[in-house]
Image: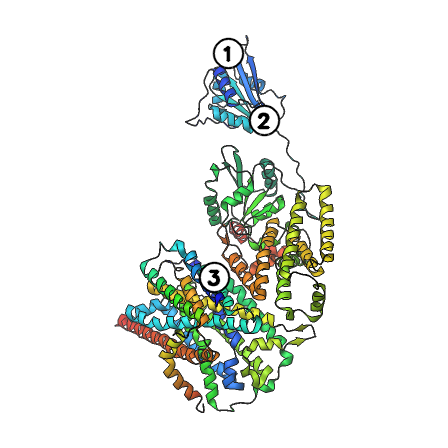
């Protein structure tokens, strides 16, 4: 089904999708795991992984332009052939069937443990998947329109919380450097490169929906949006470090804990609910985009005309996965902070770089054969 | 346990109910994957209801990527 | 002057024989006691017969004798020694001779009958197989007065009445350009309602017009009682609680909507003007905003936005906070609430539901009561029931305040259809908040947002200007920039562009 150009997203909508994707669920958990290993150098880890992310984004945008705006699956077909594409997309599908339930399980776990302890977890997960399925089925344009508003709300609330916590900050906590050498910094960089910065490689399934057929109206905006997401996350890390110091690594939900210590003028206290709105909104958006990407991979692989065919089954399977995947918290930690970054960097990143290199060679061959 | 059973039945029944009109128009490839997904959902539903420790996707991921990932971890944390 | 010689193939024709025509007409109007048949003769020896048919209840000025003016007109063209005969008269009218008033010719029974029912008077000459019809309609209509539902403190008070021609005339008076196009459709075989749709040629998006035209097709077969039937026929989603079109009974509203590029639909016998399409953000403005000063208009718009949220959310918020998240309420207020809720047997959700439902009952009952009794019942009913409920410890004072605030807030929304939408949507939100607290509320909001984003009105996204976001239009949504800025770069840039191109 050929999409007319005006039915696609404009720059603002695409950038908001990107911000939602990068910041969405990360805002809940950052910087917990990173600061657990990297302590006060967490912000350095973030900078390193952000740079990795920029490189990945660069490759994605290059491939987008070089192949006239088709999706990852499609240019993979033209670069390495149909069979290899099927083969390569299997790990991608596996990754998505992990990350999509992971996002929802994360927010469900959060709500269950912190906010409403008597309600069984499956209620939260199922409702979020239900709305995510409805949203994805409504189409990318509807999704983008909604997310422009939701991203604004999410960012505004996050910044509000970070601002209001200023009385709690102690910049001295940022000081002790490199107490354990460079390894913790690299470890932290590894974790944050997997979640969320490296995940941007999957966005190559979303970029086809922006106007321009490969010639994006403003490539700069994409980098700026990515930079904005990175800055917000970095800011969150820094603020958390300043507020909690060495204890940052022990708090499972950093931003939430930050909101709970805010106390202004006796009246504004215990405003965690504000943050919960931002967290639920962010995770919801990320889940929607993951669902959209997974659905798109299947649609493009199978050549389905009706793009909404598989949305409900995928959502159902992901729901069941989210309810059964993590048997213990230790399992969660291992999967999310060890295995997932590994797959994002060494499988996802590798596939992307491979395709970029092959694409570069093919272009060079084309130009040299045109000359000669 | 009962609430899980009821919940699972609601989930598994909702999908065909909503998707029913689309079944006639579904191409073969799509229908095949649809069925595969629904069967996986049933399997996972069984795990969900009974809480059995049957193999899940996390085990698959650990199996494939576990080795190299653990090696990497040892690099980051030599003392552990 | 119009001359119509149509004849539908399956209709019976008029014959040359006058008495046969008379019998046929009497048969059509059998048992219609308000149709008057008059018979006349003319000529030297009173040899020519004429009869007239008109609908006594529709016709004004019954003293005017159309027959004599007809004969006079025709006789002016007579040669010196010619006699005035029906053949000559027929000849005269077929050649469109000058008459003192416009006429229609018809040689079909049913068509003449239709014209009589429209308020025409039909003359049948014995010896001629056509009838001459003159327009004489003049039934009493409601006077042009202020629209009851849309009063203003300062501004014009011209409201529409039930006559299509009066309404069209009032709009023409405001928009004096031939670019204002008026197209008329007739619908239904029993009602034969005239539906007119208006648009300003360079202001309306041609695609919008195309979409509208394709939707309104097919309505001609159905009996259309009023503009709301047209609304239901052309709207995108009849099941959505949110209105996709606006109604107005003020001509200034209508004129400003035309400038915005909207299409107006008017129906005969209905004062309601349908403005299509109508975006979500249009429901927050009234014409009065443009008659008061900028600062005040902006503040009032913000107040309406606030009222919208209160009307939608307040009861659900109360339920969610008091039942699931009491820690979020500031301690002082929390103590007050707990204090006032002491002794109430129901949880907050049922209390809220009961109070809201009784408020809705009161409101609905108040509409149908005659005026003198109505207001007394509303006030006394509300006070008494509220006070009685508190004393009986069925409801807490806080709940009564919340319900009252919600009700007042919903009255602050200028458009009735949107206020209804809020009333409807409020209840599912209350249920969601009652089951899952804050999370349920969030899910409810997301669902509403999704629904609104998906909704289209005549092909345009319902939340246009918000989603897809257009900052330029923000000058006239939540605040109102000075008219200078709104006029120079008007809401409708097309009009401006074309004017610039032209000049």
Please give the residue where the numbered disc 2 appears in the rendered image. Answer: C136
Q: Left or right of A50: which side holds C44?
A: right
The local crowd at label 2, few if under 14, some if 14 to 19, many if 20 or more residues have their Cα within 10 Å, is many
Question: Can marks 3 and 1 be said to lie on one chain?
Answer: no
Q: Chain of mark 1?
A: C
Please give the residue where the numbered disc 1 appears in the rendered image. Answer: C82
Residue situated in front as seen by the camera: C74 or C144: C144
The local crowd at label 1, few if under 14, some if 14 to 19, many if 20 or more residues have their Cα within 10 Å, is few
Residue A247: numbered disc = none
Q: Quadrant of residue B58?
A: bottom left
Q: Left or right of A166: which side holds A207?
A: left
**Disc 3 from disc 2: Cα separation:** 59 Å
Please give the residue where the numbered disc 3 appears in the rendered image. Answer: A135
- Residue A206 in sight: no
Compared to residue C20, the image places residue C418 above or below, namely below
Q: Nearer the viewer, mark 3 or mark 2?
A: 3
The local crowd at label 3, few if under 14, some if 14 to 19, many if 20 or more residues have their Cα within 10 Å, is many
Q: In the image, residue C91 lies at what x, y percent? A: 47, 19
Compared to residue A40, the image places residue A208 above or below, namely above
Q: Nearer the viewer, mark 2 or mark 1?
A: 2
Q: Quadrant of residue C280?
A: bottom right
Compared to residue C345, the image places residue A94 above or below, namely below
Give the structural element (helix, strand or loop) at label 3: helix
Residue situated in front as seen by the camera: A190 or C158: A190
Residue at the extreme left: A372
Q: Quadrant of residue C333?
A: bottom right
Q: In the image, residue A139 lies at what x, y percent? A: 44, 60
Circles 3, 2 touching at the beta carbon (< 8 Å): no
**Mark 2 or 1, nearer chain start:** 1
Q: In the image, residue C71 lies at what x, y percent? A: 55, 17
Give the structural element (helix, strand or loop) at label 1: loop
């Amino acid at each position: 089904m050929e999409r007319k150009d005006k039915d696609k997203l404009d720059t603002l909508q695409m950038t908001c999708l990107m911000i939602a994707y990068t910041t969405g669920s990360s805002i809940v958990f950052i910087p917990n795991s990173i600061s657990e290993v990297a302590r006060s150098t967490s912000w350095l880890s973030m900078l390193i992984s952000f740079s990795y992310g920029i490189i990945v984004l660069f490759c994605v945008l290059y491939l987008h332009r070089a192949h006239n705006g088709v999706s990852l699956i499609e240019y993979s077909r033209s670069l390495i052939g149909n069979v290899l594409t099927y083969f390569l997309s299997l790990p991608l599908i596996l990754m998505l069937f992990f990350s999509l339930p992971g996002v929802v399980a994360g927010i469900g776990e959060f709500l269950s443990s912190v906010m409403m302890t008597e309600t069984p977890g499956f209620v939260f997960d199922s409702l979020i998947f239900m709305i995510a399925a409805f949203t994805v089925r409504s189409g990318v344009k509807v999704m983008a329109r909604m997310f422009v508003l939701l991203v604004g709300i999410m960012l505004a609330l996050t910044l509000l919380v970070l601002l209001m916590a200023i009385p709690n900050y102690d910049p001295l906590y940022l000081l002790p450097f490199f107490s354990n050498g460079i390894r913790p910094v690299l470890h932290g960089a590894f974790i944050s490169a997997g979640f969320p910065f490296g995940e941007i490689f999957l966005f190559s399934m979303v970029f086809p929906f922006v106007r321009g057929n490969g010639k994006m109206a403003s490539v700069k905006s994409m980098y700026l949006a990515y930079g904005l997401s990175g800055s917000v996350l970095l800011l969150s890390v820094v603020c958390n470090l300043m507020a909690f110091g060495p204890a940052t690594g022990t708090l499972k939900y950093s931003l939430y804990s930050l909101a709970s210590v805010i106390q202004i003028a006796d009246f504004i206290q215990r405003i965690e609910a504000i943050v919960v709105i931002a967290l639920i909104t962010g995770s919801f958006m990320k889940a929607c985009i993951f669902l959209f990407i997974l659905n798109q991979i299947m649609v493009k692989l199978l050549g389905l005309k009706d793009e909404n065919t598989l949305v409900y089954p995928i959502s159902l399977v992901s729901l069941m996965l989210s309810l059964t995947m993590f048997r213990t918290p230790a399992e969660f930690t291992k999967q999310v902070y060890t295995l997932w970054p590994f797959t994002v960097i060494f499988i996802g990143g590798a596939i992307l770089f491979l395709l970029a290199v092959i694409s570069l060679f093919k272009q060079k061959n084309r130009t040299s054969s045109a000359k000669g | 346990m009962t609430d899980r059973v009821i919940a699972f039945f609601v989930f598994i029944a909702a999908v065909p109910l909503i998707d029913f009109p689309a079944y006639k128009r579904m191409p073969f490839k799509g229908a095949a994957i649809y069925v595969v997904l629904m069967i996986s959902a049933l399997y996972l539903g069984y795990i969900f209801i009974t809480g059995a420790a049957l193999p899940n996707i996390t085990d698959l991921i650990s199996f494939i990527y576990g080795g190299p990932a653990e090696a990497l971890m040892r690099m980051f944390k030599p003392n552990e | 002057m119009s001359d119509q010689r149509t004849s539908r193939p399956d209709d019976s024709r008029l014959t040359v024989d006058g008495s046969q025509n008379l019998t046929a007409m009497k048969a059509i109007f059998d048992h219609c006691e308000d149709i008057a048949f008059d018979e006349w003769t003319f000529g030297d020896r009173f040899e020519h017969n004429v009869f007239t048919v008109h609908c006594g209840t529709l016709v004004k000025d019954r003293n005017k004798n159309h027959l004599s003016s007809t004969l006079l007109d025709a006789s002016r063209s007579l040669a010196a020694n010619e006699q005035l005969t029906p053949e000559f008269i027929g000849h005269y009218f077929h050649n469109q001779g000058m008459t003192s008033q416009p006429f229609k010719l018809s040689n079909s029974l049913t068509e003449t009958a239709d014209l009589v029912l429209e308020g025409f008077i039909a003359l049948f000459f014995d010896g001629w197989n056509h009838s001459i019809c003159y327009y004489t309609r003049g039934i009493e209509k409601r006077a042009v007065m202020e629209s009851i539902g849309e009063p203003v403190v300062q501004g014009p008070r011209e409201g529409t009445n039930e006559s299509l021609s009066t309404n069209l005339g009032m709009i023409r008076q405001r928009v004096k350009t031939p670019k204002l196009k008026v197209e008329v459709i007739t619908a239904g075989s029993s009602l034969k309602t005239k539906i007119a749709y208006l648009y300003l040629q360079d202001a309306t998006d041609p695609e919008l017009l195309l979409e509208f035209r394709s939707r309104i097709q097919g309505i001609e077969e159905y009996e259309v009682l009023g503009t709301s039937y047209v609304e239901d026929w052309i709207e995108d989603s009849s099941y959505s609680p949110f209105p996709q079109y606006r109604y107005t009974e003020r001509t200034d509203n209508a004129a400003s909507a035309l400038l915005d590029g909207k299409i107006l639909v008017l129906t005969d016998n209905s004062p309601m003007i349908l403005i299509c399409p109508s975006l979500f953000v249009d429901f927050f403005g009234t014409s009065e905003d443009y008659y008061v000063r900028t600062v005040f208009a902006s503040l009032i718009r913000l107040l309406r936005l606030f009222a919208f949220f209160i009307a939608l959310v307040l009861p659900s918020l109360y339920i969610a906070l008091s039942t699931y998240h009491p820690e979020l309420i500031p301690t002082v207020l929390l103590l007050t609430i707990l204090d006032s809720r002491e002794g109430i047997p129901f949880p907050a959700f049922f209390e809220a539901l009961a109070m809201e439902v009784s408020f809705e009952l009161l409101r609905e009952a108040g509409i149908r009561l005659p005026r003198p009794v109505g207001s007394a019942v509303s006030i006394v009913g509300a006070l008494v029931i509220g006070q009685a409920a508190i004393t009986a410890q069925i409801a807490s004072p806080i709940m009564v305040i919340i319900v009252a605030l919600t009700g007042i807030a919903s009255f602050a929304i200028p458009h009735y259809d949107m206020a209804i939408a809020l009333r409807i949507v409020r209840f599912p939100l209350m249920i969601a908040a009652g089951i899952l607290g804050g999370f349920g509320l969030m899910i409810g909001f997301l669902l509403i947002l999704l629904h609104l984003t998906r909704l289209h009105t005549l092909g345009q996204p319902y939340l246009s200007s918000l989603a897809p976001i257009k900052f330029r239009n923000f000058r006239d949504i939540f605040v109102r920039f000075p008219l200078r800025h709104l006029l120079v770069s008007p809401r409708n840039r097309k009009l401006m562009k074309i004017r610039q191109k032209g000049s």
